Image: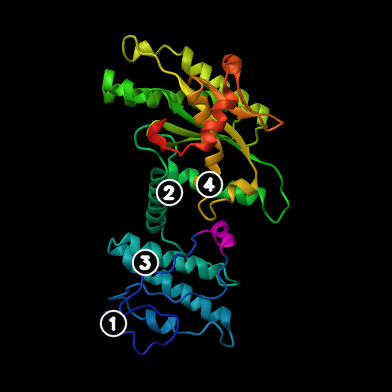
Amino acid sequence: MLVRGSRLVGRPDRASSTTPAEPPTPLRASPDDVSENPVHEPTASTFDTSPIVGIDEALRQDAAADDPGAARAAQARAHEAAAEVLADRGEWRRAYQHLRAAMALVHLGDTPPVHVPEQLRREVDRLRRERAEAREQSRRDSLTATWNRRYLDERLSTLRDGIDGADGTAGAVCVALLDVDHFKQVNDTYGHAVGDSVLRTLVTLMREGIDGPAPDGFCARYGGEEFALVLTGATPDDAVRTCEGIRARVEEHDWTAIAPDLRVTVSAGVCCLGADALADAGDDPTPGALDRVDELLYVAKRTGRNAVAYRDAADRVRLAGPAAGRRGVEAVVRSVREAPRPGRSGH
């Protein structure tokens, strides 16, 4: 029987000939993936199967019938057949969808494993790699190749759940905001190409500074010349030392290799945030949580820049390293708290 223009469905649907096809429900293609998102019953398929022969009848078998295992096996074989036909025609993405559906059915129970042709297996592997690469690129900053704001939001959400999870895990996540001092002046004096080189070099220096004391930490471009450093597993003292080490590394770097007489310094605020702080902004933890860190960055800027500001065990704002002797820190803290925040461009 040759069926054209049909849709794969889990159960009979008299209106299927007039109802537009819906996007397919994503299904996992490997046992590990399926264990994370278990499927409790075969999902109705809406993949366009024309002109594949004999698919609809098999997929209409009810998995809740007397022999659900046999029904799933028939559905898995139908999806496998569809994948082979589509692969023969070079329609690899549609073939991949059917193969994923077949694999999901196999992992529901005692369904016999499907046979995957070698050519289809290779193409599926290629599509999975492409998907993984696309996901990676969507979380990278195009200029500096470090992580971007999307990745930062996702990781902070994950870390918040770990701190406040059902397993009773307790602790904090140390986060820093680091900003290039007078970066607009660098761009105005040397041009944007030099400014771009400064940011790329800065990322390298930050990674080198993180790798030793916080190997599980990472940096992400938060916006413009501002970066977030997430120092997972670090104590508050470790976090301050790491940020002060990065500040010193940047100050001592030979920037004249990029442009004559170029000098670059950075300022940073660092704070260890508990689950309450990370939950301030609900589903998007970054803005609310980082307000506390941003306040410390303002203090570092307004006390003379090229400094790292933090809170000590008594919750007093301090400056680390050589900047510790600067006067007027408390007055700056009061002015930062009381004055309206002009926005990040005012840094």
- Residue 71 picture location, percent across and down: 52, 81
**Magenta span covers which residues?**
30-37
Identity, as a three-letter code, of the amino acid under mark 2: Ala
Q: CA distance from mark 4 to mark 1?
A: 59 Å
Select label 2 or label 4 by which is in front: 4
Residue 132 numbered mark, or none: 2
Q: Which residue is mark 4?
A: 288
Name which residue lies at 48% across and 12% down.
Answer: 252
Identity, as a three-letter code, of the amino acid under mark 4: Gly
- Tell me: 302 left or right of 272: left
- Tell me: 58 left or right of 189: right
Q: Earlier in the sequence, mark 4 or mark 1?
A: 1
SS for callout 1: loop
Name which residue lies at 58% across and 23% down.
Answer: 329
Q: Which residue is mark 3?
A: 84
Select label 3 or label 2 by which is in front: 2
Q: Earlier in the sequence, mark 3 or mark 2?
A: 3
